[in-house]
Image (tube, coloured by chain):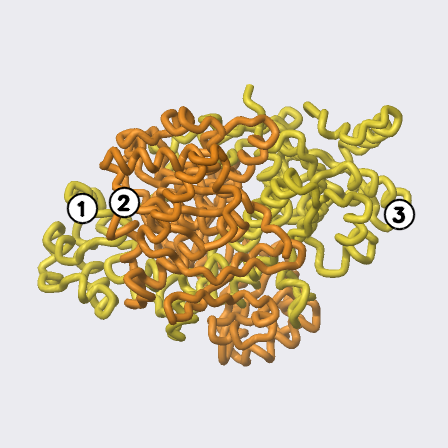
Chain colours: A orange, B yellow
Amino acid sequence: MMDLPLEGITVLEFSQYLSGPSAGLRLADLGARVIKIERPIHGEAGRKLSIKNLWVDESSLLFHTINRNKESFAADLKNPDDIALVKQLITRADVLIHNFRPGVMKKIGLDYAAAADINPRLIYAEITGYGKDGPWREKPGQDLLLQSITGLAFTTGNFTNGPVPFGIAIADILCGSQLVQGIIAALIRRNKKGVGALVEISLMESLLDFQFELLTTYYNSRQQPKRSHTNSGHTLLGAPYGVYKTADGYIALAMMDIGVLAETIECTALYGFTNDHAFAQRDHIKALLAAHLLTQPAQHWLQRLQQRGLWAMEVFDWEKMMAHDSYRALQMEQTLKAEGKQIITTRCPIRINGRRLFSDRPAPKVGEHTEKLIREMNEVIVNKEPHAFRRYTGN
Amino acid sequence: MMDLPLEGITVLEFSQYLSGPSAGLRLADLGARVIKIERPIHGEAGRKLSIKNLWVDESSLLFHTINRNKESFAADLKNPDDIALVKQLITRADVLIHNFRPGVMKKIGLDYAAAADINPRLIYAEITGYGKDGPWREKPGQDLLLQSITGLAFTTGNFTNGPVPFGIAIADILCGSQLVQGIIAALIRRNKKGVGALVEISLMESLLDFQFELLTTYYNSRQQPKRSHTNSGHTLLGAPYGVYKTADGYIALAMMDIGVLAETIECTALYGFTNDHAFAQRDHIKALLAAHLLTQPAQHWLQRLQQRGLWAMEVFDWEKMMAHDSYRALQMEQTLKAEGKQIITTRCPIRINGRRLFSDRPAPKVGEHTEKLIREMNEVIVNKEPHAFRRYTGN
């Protein structure tokens, strides 16, 4: 069995909800040992965040989804004895992640300066909502709020819809993903130079980076791109780019030549339009096209479009997607084994040497690994092995 | 000046448009030397992809945005002499990225087996649209099409809107981001074990991973979550989560107690509703709330909500966001210097040891660095220095 790329790396996760824990999840997927540091009894706040009232044990299905394949160390960060144990863990860890609001880690004596003091090789990674300066630094770093103040909600939906937020926690997920990049890159540098690092990111910077194409256009033209009035797909792309209703379902049309499109689907109303009109007359073209596509079912159009090599696909919901062989071929599902229950969830999307990265460990119970970790640390002291964590091989 | 974490790493980028080049961009941001391998004269197809007809030189503003801080090596991959040079580059590189359709790299003799044969330490990273198996493997790997077939378009907008695609190339950007994770993780393993790796990802797997919370809920309940009829924010969250119109603008309301909300904004129509109704009567509560919030301007509501500690923010477009001190405090903009022109764009969102990662190098011209790279390779041969690329220090 091939070694996973991050085997031997120990991560302490002082995180709650989605952004920090999703970073920890990816590091675990890639082979790191990830230890959640949680308050005793209740654990991190995300354990009680349920959707559709789906529970696995005393923690929600949602929590298991984000925190599978991790361990849990219970510590009361207001208790000096617990802080002392946590510091022992930090001494032996490679990475620390937190997504507390600015100032919280300093107050409990675990800010970067303090942590680097006891472990100069530590990669200390922190997520804030809005950065640590600026007037919003104390505001709640919540996904919808970040979408709302970064202009993102004006990129999606039709012009007449008003702002349309993304229905997925895009700020949390992107920010977690970028934090992972920073952490692993800092580990590379540590391998070479022996130094730790402070890696910082904010939900706001993540969403600005996400809009880099649009913002660069705006910086250099000072014109806010406008969504089309109908069938909006991307503010910077001309007709027909968008999703269209047919007689029996929806189809997506990506970039394509307007003249070829008109001919292929015999849309006489569009005859005479060329790509020169694709942006200037975007909304008019889209409206004509939308009316025409309503007259026949999706497969009628898709056959003609795809035969001509035009970029068009059906629009699926999950039921239809999961029934398709292309979904099955990916083997994207995996099953976690939690106390007699089975939880089906997605796997890590990255493959290494053709291997899909599966793991069937569910999320830990609060403090499930506290004693074991203390025992491990004691062994380290007895045997004077500074890197005992690195020898860890299983649950 | 602190070393950037990936300094000394050389990346060959056989990529076009957004997914592959955005991965290369992040690696360059983090300090890697990224060399685009492009066909002579025209270069990669993305050079001619312009938005709003904004051009910097013979390449579009969009291209510069995605390909700043890289070098360019021109090679005709159908010409054996050029292939021989490219193989010399591969011998000396650490990472190779491509996003060609399945089979293309094999046809030109540069698939993973061939590349690993000449450089067993190479990290070979590839992006496909739909994976390399399954009936869609030859379909165009285009962002909107991927959004459409993965169910993503049913997560956003209101129930009555039909499918609503995200107005940003989410599949490309996420996939590029995850590829970077896989690449750097594989570099860590190479440092330890001396072995290269094949890292694979597809746009489809990236978008499935992106929906991991929603899909896990669906896998385990088999109920497709429904968007609310009005003010939709997240299908799995109850009222009031969403964006609301006021007398003079929009505000975002995240999770909050319905009773406390009703009292704070004196919404008598909502008196008697509690959090127990937040999901079961989501659409009804949202409609009552939407009507009430129309009666006063945004600041009226925000003052009351924020004073009470409820999670609410204004909804900004970019003009308003950029006028705000919180945006300025991030210093997210940077200026590229291209032939007398200045291009303002965003920087990398990750900070290392408090340092923001800026770079003022614009995208290269096609083949701008071909001769220099050939010279460097010749010096390597003469001096028998296998890692001459690692000594590279500037433009």
> Does the residue at mark 2 contact the one at mark 1 (Cβ under 8 Å)?
no
User: Label 2: chain?
Assistant: B
Q: Could you give the CA–CA distance between mark 3 and mark 2, rounded to whole angstroms?
A: 58 Å
In the rendered view of the protein, which quadrant contains the C terminus of chain A?
A: bottom left
Mark 3 highlights which residue?
Answer: B79
Instruction: Please say whether residue A291 is visible from this viewpoint.
Output: no
Q: Could you give the CA–CA distance between mark 1 and mark 3, rounded to whole angstroms?
A: 66 Å
In this orientation, which residue lies closer to the viewer: B54 or B224?
Answer: B224
- The residue drawn where x is 65% and y is 70% is B134
- Name the outermost residue toward the right: B81
In this orientation, which residue lies closer to the viewer: B58 or B92?
Answer: B92
Mark 1 highlights which residue?
Answer: B305
Q: Callout 3: 10 Å neighbours few (<14), some, many (20+)?
A: few
Instruction: Please say whether residue B272 is visible from this viewpoint.
Output: yes
**Is disc 3 in the same subunit as disc 2?**
yes
Amino acid type at image mark 3: Asn
**Is disc 1 in the same subunit as disc 3?**
yes
Mark 2 highlights which residue?
Answer: B313
Amino acid type at image mark 1: Leu
For mark 1, give the secondary structure: helix
Q: Could you give the CA–CA distance between mark 2 and mark 1, rounded to whole angstroms?
A: 9 Å
Amino acid type at image mark 2: Met
User: For residue B87, which numbered disc appears in the image?
Assistant: none
Looking at the image, residue B52 lies above or below residue B10: below
